[in-house]
Image (cartoon, rainbow, N blue to C red):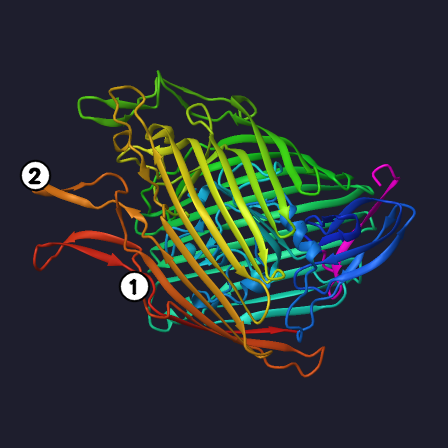
């Protein structure tokens, strides 16, 4: 068979209802014991011997297609998949497709269907992608009301978050209560926790890759929802039927309007806009333009105003160069803005980070056992640490602009997916990244280090510059280059069982300057340079995977260990805000994280859900640079601010009937590390607290139960307006989970006391969803 002439079959798989391309569809040839999956744009290509073969096309939530084809020449074969009928108890996936996933050398990857996310009970009734990710093993955050998320003991700034390939620098609205992703506009998402393919780089912890829908090119449709504090609306339809489409969606919160009725001068709200235009020029060429714009506004008695948000735009050209080569050219602009107005001080503050990104990626299908991904990426960065200007004629503020910084990051990569035998498959590759720190005004130069150690007082101090250098932004101040190998292996020792192993090295050249456990809008991004080294990570992971009971259940068990070099730490008393010489208050350290993850899922039937458990440790240390220096925390390892020993999530959905289904989540987590005072002393009538070692204490354990019910009235006809009601209770038993514990002196008794801050008790929600 291997000596026979091989021919190319390629095509695109789409949704039959709206013509949307489908990523990750299984294309199988059972008799040949081979197959492939569609890429992010719904394209597939595979080589098979001439002759008559059975082809099966399957995708979760859609009816499978099976047919026999006579292959005598290279052929283009497109598929239209119909969604599963509502009266089907379950979607039948063929055994071959599940065996393909077992054999595939992809590990430490989680995929969530939007339909699954939309059933999760969440705070305020707002469906949230990031909150759903927190129910997966290895993913957590720094508590209620915190921005971002942490993956396998990594910091929130170490996650690469992509929306249609554009970088999102802050994934949260309202300081973490909502995410920036409108679920109505999202087509698919993947979270890579390990075994990260070579096409991704620039962050060391994880990759969250999200794609927006292309838009319905067959008919106009709209859907949305009205909740207690926010609403959303999305519209899509053809520009030219079957050839081009548009999508536009918006969300906004409005709880601040009710506060005004009570004479409350404070307010906090957000709004965002998603848009996409798709033009299919012919069978080989597609042009896509997508964009996102979001803003958060926070007012405090009209004397404090905070505005921040992301803006991203992407112009892409998909082209089938040959029957077995697919290319994607992207031009991307990303802008994260932070603005602050303080009327009682009399100034405005503006900061942010912009980048312009060029990407050219190719998928090359050599034969049915070997495929290549390769490409080139280049990103220009402009860092604006901050601008201060007076906001009125009477203000005494002197205008000041912190020094802007510039950098160019480029990379080339090659990744190979190789089916070595029927049981063994591999994905291996290499990425070479290069980072150029460009010239700037006022670059401080030091004799030795920007941070000195005062042996007399036993403290680290800011060093005095010996000179200041100014250079053009076209000049290179420092260059970094790193090879980043990747490897993943899968050995299937049975049709429904496999073991997998992965290794990846990642390098991160940009750093989030913060001393909080969760990113805040005031945090500043800064590039590696003359005195700041890039972070470099090595991670190994191993796992066991099995499907049970005709694929009704699946089990994933993974263990991981990762080490990180040149993780920034901050000297005691560091001033991070409006600091033009941030290198004077930071020291390079190291970090490590290790743990085990379990994910047990029930995939079929009226009752579905999963149990996720993570046992892990995340810690860091910053040793002294010389024998006389103590380093940070006496050079000892200490828990990171997002270390959680135990993390349990139980998620369940029960479909009672076509009208009613119920969902519930239960979460239990070890309390976050913190630092408590152990004593105090009085100096010149001031009480000075004495603190324990960094993060040597913990907040109380965190746990809560959420429930929701969805009622869907029966539609009167196939084309009629459809709707549903979602009723939810967040934190059913009103657990007062601690966000922080502060210590103070009681004004009445003069006794020291601990004060717990909690954000939420029980929170009810009602959301009306509609579609027409």
Label 2, residues with CA under 10 Å away: few <14, some 14-19, many ≥20 = few
* SS under mark 1: loop
**How far across and how far down the image is residue 343, in percent?**
34, 52
Q: Is residue 209 left or right of residue 638?
A: right
User: Quadrant of the rendered structure where residue 273 is?
Assistant: bottom right
264 vs 507, left or right, is left
Query: Does dot 2 land on a helix, a strand or a loop?
Result: loop
Can I make out residue 730 in this image? yes
User: Which contiguous range is marked in magenta?
Assistant: 1-21
Local crowd size for mark 1, using a 10 Å CA cut-off: few (<14), some (14–19), many (≥20): some
Q: Say whether residue 1 is left or right of residue 197.
A: right
Q: Are marks 2 and 1 in contact (CB under 8 Å)?
A: no
* Extreme-top residue of the structure: 447
| Residue 584 picture quarter | top left
Label 2 to label 1: alpha-carbon separation: 38 Å
From where the camera sits, is residue 351 visible? Answer: no
Q: Residue at x 21, y 57 (%)?
A: 755
Which of the marked residues, 2 or 1, is nearer the chain's N terminus? 2
User: Residue at label 2?
Assistant: 684
Report the label total: 2
**Pick the front one: 218 or 715:** 715
* Residue position marked by numbered label 1 in the rendering: 736
Would you say residue 12 sits in the magenta stretch? yes
Q: In which quadrant will I find the C terminus?
A: bottom right
Residue 154, image x and y in percent?
43, 42
């Amino acid at each position: 068979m291997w000596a026979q002439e091989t021919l190319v079959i390629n095509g695109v798989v789409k949704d039959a209802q709206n013509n949307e391309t489908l990523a990750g569809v299984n294309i199988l040839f059972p008799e040949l014991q081979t197959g492939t999956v569609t890429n992010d744009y719904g394209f597939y290509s595979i080589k098979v011997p001439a002759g008559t073969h059975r082809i099966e096309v399957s995708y979760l939530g859609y009816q499978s297609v099976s047919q026999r084809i006579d292959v005598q020449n290279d052929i283009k074969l497109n598929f239209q998949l119909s969604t599963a009928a509502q009266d089907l108890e379950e979607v039948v996936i063929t055994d071959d497709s599940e065996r393909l996933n077992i054999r595939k050398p992809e590990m430490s990857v989680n995929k969530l269907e939007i339909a699954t996310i939309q059933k999760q009970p969440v705070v305020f009734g707002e469906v949230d992608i990031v909150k759903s990710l927190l129910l997966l093993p290895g993913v957590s955050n720094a508590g209620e009301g915190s921005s971002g998320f942490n993956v396998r003991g990594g910091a929130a700034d170490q996650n690469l978050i992509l929306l249609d390939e554009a970088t999102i620098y802050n994934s949260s609205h309202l300081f973490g209560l909502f995410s920036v992703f409108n679920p109505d506009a999202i087509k698919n998402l993947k979270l890579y926790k390990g075994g990260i393919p070579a096409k991704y780089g620039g962050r060391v912890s994880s990759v969250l890759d999200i794609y927006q829908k292309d838009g319905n090119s067959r008919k106009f449709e709209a859907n949305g929802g009205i909740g207690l504090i926010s609403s959303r609306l999305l519209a899509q339809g053809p520009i030219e039927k079957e050839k081009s489409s548009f999508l536009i969606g918006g969300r906004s919160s409005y709880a601040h309007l009710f506060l005004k009725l009570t004479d409350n001068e404070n307010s906090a709200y957000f709004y965002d806009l998603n848009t996409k235009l798709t033009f299919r020029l012919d069978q080989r060429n597609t042009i896509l333009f997508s964009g996102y714009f979001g803003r958060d506004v926070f007012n405090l008695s009209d004397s404090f105003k905070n505005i921040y948000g992301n803006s991203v735009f992407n112009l892409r050209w998909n082209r089938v160069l040959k029957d077995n080569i697919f290319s994607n050219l992207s031009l991307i602009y990303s802008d994260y803005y932070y603005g602050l107005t303080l009327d009682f001080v009399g100034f405005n503050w503006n900061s942010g980070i912009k980048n312009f990104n060029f990407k050219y990626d190719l998928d090359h299908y050599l034969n049915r056992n070997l495929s290549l991904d390769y490409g080139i990426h280049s990103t220009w960065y402009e860092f604006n640490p901050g601008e201060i200007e007076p906001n009125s004629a009477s203000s005494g503020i002197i205008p000041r602009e912190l020094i802007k910084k510039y950098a160019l990051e480029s990379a080339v990569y090659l990744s190979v997916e190789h089916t070595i035998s029927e049981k063994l498959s591999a994905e291996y590759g290499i990425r070479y990244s290069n980072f150029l720190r460009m010239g700037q005004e006022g670059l401080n130069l030091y004799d030795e280090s920007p941070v000195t150690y005062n042996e007399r007082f036993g403290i680290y101090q800011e060093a005095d510059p010996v000179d200041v250098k100014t250079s053009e932004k076209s000049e290179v101040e420092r260059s970094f280059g790193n090879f980043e190998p990747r490897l993943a292996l899968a050995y299937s020792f049975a049709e429904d069982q496999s073991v997998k192993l992965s290794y990846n090295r990642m390098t991160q050249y940009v750093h989030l300057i913060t001393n909080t456990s969760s990113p805040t809008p005031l945090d500043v991004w800064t590039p590696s340079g003359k005195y700041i080294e890039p972070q470099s990570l090595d991670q190994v992971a191993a796992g066991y995977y099995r499907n049970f009971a005709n694929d009704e259940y699946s089990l994933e068990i993974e263990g991981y260990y990762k080490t990180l070099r040149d993780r920034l730490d901050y000297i005691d008393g560091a001033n991070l805000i409006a600091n033009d010489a941030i290198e004077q208050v930071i020291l390079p350290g190291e970090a490590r994280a290790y743990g085990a993850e379990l994910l047990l899922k029930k995939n079929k039937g009226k009752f579905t859900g999963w149990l996720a458990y993570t046992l892990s440790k995340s810690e860091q240390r910053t040793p002294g640079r010389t024998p006389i220096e103590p380093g940070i925390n006496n050079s000892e390892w200490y828990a990171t601010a997002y270390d959680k020993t135990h993390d349990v999530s139980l998620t369940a959905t029960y479909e009672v009937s076509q009208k009613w289904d119920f969902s519930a989540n239960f979460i239990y987590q070890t309390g976050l590390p913190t630092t408590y005072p152990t004593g105090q002393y009085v100096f010149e009538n001031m009480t000075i607290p004495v603190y324990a070692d960094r993060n040597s204490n913990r907040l109380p354990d965190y746990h809560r139960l959420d429930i929701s019910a969805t009622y869907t009235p029966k539609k009167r006809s196939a084309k009629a307006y459809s709707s549903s009601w979602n009723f939810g209770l967040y934190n059913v038993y009103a657990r007062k989970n601690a966000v922080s514990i502060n210590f103070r002196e009681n004004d009445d008794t003069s006794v020291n006391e601990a004060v717990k801050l909690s954000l939420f008790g029980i929170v009810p929600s009602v959301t009306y969803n509609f579609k027409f």
